[in-house]
Amino acid sequence: MTLETRITYNPLQCGGKPCVRNMRIRVSDILQMLGEGISTEEILQDFPDLELLDIQACLIYAARRANLERLVA
């Protein structure tokens, strides 16, 4: 599984927000936790189904979204 395929969309799940591997773990929740200073180790302990590559995929997703928004503005 590549980093890009770890982020999924389902309009019937989590309000259509991007999630990690079709789980009910939103990308925005992971990013918010990282922004609040929660370590990746703590996140992985709290969400045992997550993998380190999932967190990395969230960061790459956010970076690409930020770049796209800059190009559109």
Image (cartoon, rainbow, N blue to C red):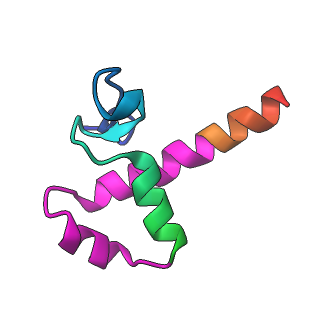
Q: For the view shown, which residue lies furthest in the top direction?
A: 11
- Residue 69 image offset from top left, x and y in percent: 73, 35
Query: Which residue corresponds to the image point at 33% horizontal and 33% vertical from the top-left?
Result: 5
Quadrant placement of the N terminus: top left
Position of residue 47 relative to residue 16, above or below, is below
Quadrant placement of the C terminus: top right
Query: Which residue corresponds to the image point at 24% horizontal and 69% vertical from the top-left?
Result: 44
Nearer to the camera, 68 or 32: 32
- Residue 19 image offset from top left, x and y in percent: 34, 39
Q: Main secondary structure of the magenta part?
A: helix
Q: Which residues are magenta?
A: 37-64
Q: For the view shown, which residue lies furthest in the right direction?
A: 73
Nearer to the camera, 50 or 16: 16
54 part of magenta stretch: yes
Position of residue 43 relative to residue 69, above or below, is below
Nearer to the camera, 46 or 2: 46
